Amino acid sequence: MLRTFNGCAHEWFIALTESEDEAKLDLTLFASMQAILATSRIAVFSVKKALKEQSAALICDNLSCLDFSSQDIDNLYQKLQDNKIHISESLAERVSYIPICHGESVIGFVVAAHELGDIASTKQLNTAINVLHIYANQQHILFKNRLDPLTELLNRQTFNNKMMEVITGHDHNERRDQIDEHCAWYLAMLDIDNFKKVNDQFGHVIGDEVLILMAGLMKCNFRSEDYIFRYGGEEFSVLFKCADESTAEHILERLRETIAGYNFPQAKSMTMSIGFTELKSCTLIPKLVQQADLALYHSKESGRNSVTNFKIIAHLHNIDYVTEHELFK
Ligand SMILES: Nc1nc2c(ncn2[C@@H]2O[C@H](COP(=O)(O)OP(=O)(O)OP(=O)(O)O)[C@@H](O)[C@H]2O)c(=O)[nH]1
């Protein structure tokens, strides 16, 4: 049911700043706009930094009567870069397009449709703009909280939540046009080889530089819808989606080769060992991490600078893909 607006936006400020995840934040914004602008016919579009998107995507919508193509959305987003409210009027209704701003940037917009006799007042629009500022700030805080400050990759705290979302099929960042039933998710664990030597020989500042450069190489190797984490120290993990395991191996091999061929400023030549496993929805998260870790361990044991598929070593050691056995004790 549509909540009515009592003229004071404090309750929405509190609800938005209390939202601890992006899905809840988006839903709270949607409800707040419906109440403040006194219409249920609202659509919210936002640029998701976590997805490295440059254009706005629909996040909540109760306006299916207005059919937005992706070209319409892009055009509207470009138009609203002037950070002003735009209004279009037809015989029956007035549609307001309200930009969402963060600092100097427009990071999205709200579309609100009203019947002509029932349009939003200037006070309502101003209140909506204030609430949108709070939303943008909170979105930025949530985004920053998920990042490792050194590498700006996703941090370890985000890893479990993301794994759970992916395994249960509730990855709320996955855009509708990216859902491909034929693709599978893979988990890779990656560890820089002999990293201690870099710290010992050149100091921690150069060690940190290597971590930042490695993170950059990984970001270039994967797609925006994949998730790259700094798992801890010099260990990383990646959740990525592709057609099959040979493609997964190819993607990881490409990264391994890129890193092995990169000329690091002080450390010069560095390599990475990688292990990966396919995500099966019936398997517990610690089990999946253990499988990818065992494959990584195999890469390290067999001379480093290589990629191992858990399935291959599971087969070699004659163990079931999802049993409790441990390979290396
Ligand atoms: N500069 C820097 N070093 C880090 C950071 N986190 C962990 N390390 C270092 O990473 C090194 C990891 O060393 P090891 O676990 O022995 O691994 P390795 O030398 O890479 O050897 P292998 O993994 O067996 O190839 C340790 O020296 C840690 O101090 C960090 O944020 N910055």
Image (spheres, grey):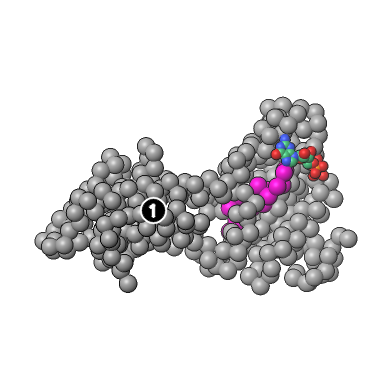
Residue 283 visible (yes or no): yes
Question: For the residue labelled by badge 1, is the local secondary structure a helix, a strand or a loop?
Answer: helix
Which residue corresponds to the image point at 79% horizontal and 58% vertical from the top-left?
294
Q: In the rendered structure, which segment of residues is drawn in magenta?
A: 227-241
Residue at figure coordinates x 77%, y 33% from the top left: 199
Residue at point 61% right, 44% down?
148
Q: Is residue 231 magenta?
A: yes
Count of marks overlaid on the render = 1
Residue 49 percent across, percent down from the top left: 47, 47
- Image point (73%, 54%), residue name: 275
Residue 33: percent from left, percent from top: 31, 58
In the picture of the structure, the residue carrying the numbered disc 1 is 13
Direction from residue 1 to residue 232 in the image, left or right: right
Kind of residue indicated by mark 1: Phe
Quadrant of the rendering where the N terminus is positioned: bottom left
Residue 52 visible from this viewpoint: no
Q: Percent x, y for residue 287?
A: 73, 65
Q: In front: 316, or 163? A: 163
